[in-house]
Image: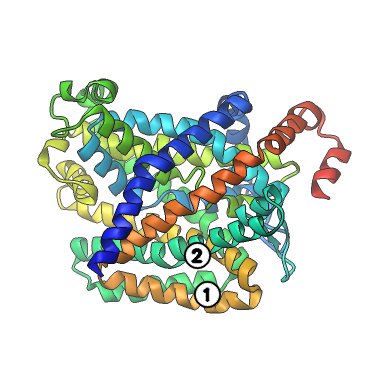
Amino acid sequence: MNVLNNIVLTMQHYLSDYILIFMLVGGGIWFTVNLRFIQVRGFSQGMRIMFGGLIHKKGKADKAGMSSFQALATAIAAQVGTGNIAGAATALSIGGPGAIFWMWIAAFFGMATIFSEAVMAQKYKRIGEDGQITGGPVYYIRAAFTGRFGKVLAAAFSVLIILALGFMGNAVQSNSIADAFHTAFGIPQYIMGIVVAVLALFIFTGGISRIAKFTEYVVPFMAILYIVGSLIVIFANYKNIPYAFESIFVGAFKPDAVAGGAAGATIKLAVSKGVARGLFSNEAGMGSTPHAHAVAKVDHPAQQGFAAMIGVFIDTFIVLNMTAFVILTTKSIPTGLTGAQLSQYAFSTLYGKGGNIFIAVCMFFFAFSTVVGWYFFGEMNVKYLFGPKAVKVYAVLVACCVFLGSLAKVDLVWNMSDCFNSLMVIPNIVALFALTKTIKTVHDDYYNNFLPSEPEESRAEWHK
C-alpha cells in the first residue's frame, strides 16, 4: 500500500507541477490569442446571461436539457468546493500572498479555455439512448480524432472522470463535511456520512430535473452566504486591506519582502502553488464542467461559452478571493496553520467559536453541491460507456463512496483521486488543441452572423 501510494504521489507531483501547468496555462494563452481575448470581449454577455437566468428563472430542465442558468449553476456547484476554503489557504501558507496573484493570472487565461470547452460541448452534444440530451469531452474528443485512437482516448477519459470525481472525489468531499461537522458540533462522522449519502441519493435518483432544481437554488444561496460572512470579517479589518493588496503584488515577485509572509516562500513556489490552485479550483481545461454546459438550451453554442466564463470568474475572482482576503486582512499566515484550519482560525478572529460553525456550514454546502455536480458529470460518462441502464447502479455506488468517505481519510484514495483528476486533463486539452479551427469558426459565426440580428436560419442551423 505504501509503495503504491508513493508511486501515485510521484506521478501527481510531475503531473501537477510540470506537465499540467504548462498544458493548462499554455492552452489558456493559446485560446486567448486565437479568440482575441474573448474573456474581455464576451464578459458582459456572460454576465447578462447569468443575471437574466438568476432573475427570470427561464426554462425547466427536461429531456431537452437545462436552461443556460441551470447549466451554469451545475458547473459552479462542481467548481466551488472545499478547495475554495482549504485550497486557497494552502496556497497562501506555502506560496505566500503572491500565490493569489498567480491564481488570478491562471483564472484569466482559463476563462478562454473554458469558453472553448463549453462551445465544443454544445456543438457536439447529442441525444442519448434514453432520449435525453448528453454531451461532454468524450464526444468532442471523438470529433477531433476519428478512428480507434479517438475511441480509446474518449474511453480513457470516461474511466478517469468516473473514478476521479464520481467515486474517489466524492468520498473526499464527504470526508470534508463529516470532519467539519465533527469539529464544530461533535457529530460522529458516520452519522454525517449517512445523512449526506441519503440526501445525495435522493437528488441523484431524481434525474436531470432534480439536479438542476437543486443547483439553481442552492448555488446562489451558498455563494451569497460565504461572500457576506467573508466581507464582514474583511471590513472589520478594513485597515489591513491596503496591506493585503500590497502583500499580493509584492509577494508575486519578491516573496521574502512581505512582512508576515509564508516562511521559505519563493517566486517559484508562489507561481506553482498559485497557478495549480487556481486551475484546479475553477476546473478550466479539466473536462468536467463541459458536461453541464452541453445540456444547456441556448440558441448558439457561443452563448453557453460566455456563461461558462462567468463560472470561472465567480469561483476564483470572487469566492476564492474571499478566503484569501479574510486570511490576509486578519494576518493569519504566521500562525503556521494550513488548509481548512488556517481558514477556520482567520474567521474565528472575529466570530470566535462561531468561526468553526460558519466554516462547517459553508463546507457542507460547498462540498455537497460538488458531490451533486461531480455525480452528474460521471453519470454522463457511465451512459457513454455502459448505457442508461447502468445509471441506477452508478448512483448507488456513488452513495456508498460518499458514506465510506465520511468514515476516515485514506491517503491512497485521496492521492489517486488527485492523480486521476490530473490525468483526465491530458485527453481533454489535446482534443481542444486539435479543434482550435472549429472553435474559432463557431466564435466567428456568432460575431459575424448571429449576434447582430440573430436570424432564425442561424438558430435553426445550430439546433440541427
| Residue 192 location (% of width, % of height) | 31, 71
- Label 2 packing within 10 angstroms: few (<14), some (14-19), many (20+): many
Q: Residue furthest left?
A: 335
Left or right of 144, for residue 248: left
Residue 291 appears in the picture as rendered:
yes
Q: Residue furthest right?
A: 457
- Quadrant for residue 178, please give it: bottom left
* Disc number lying in front (1 or 2): 2
The answer to which quarter of the image holds residue 401 is bottom left
Identify residue type, mark 2.
Ile
Instruction: For mark 1, give the secondary structure.
Output: helix
**In the shown orientation, is residue 417 left or right of residue 454?**
left
Question: Pointer 1: what residue?
Answer: 394
Front-lying residue, 453 or 56: 453
Q: Amino acid at mark 1?
A: Tyr
Q: Residue at x 54, y 58 (%)?
A: 157
Let me know if residue 365 appears in the view.
Answer: no
In the rendered image of this protein, does residue 422 appear above or below residue 376?
above
Of residues 30 and 292, the one drawn nearer to the viewer in this rendering: 30
Q: What's the mark number on residue 63?
A: none
Mark 2 — residue? 162
Answer above or below: position of 142 versus 312.
Answer: below
- Mark 2 lies on a secondary structure that is helix
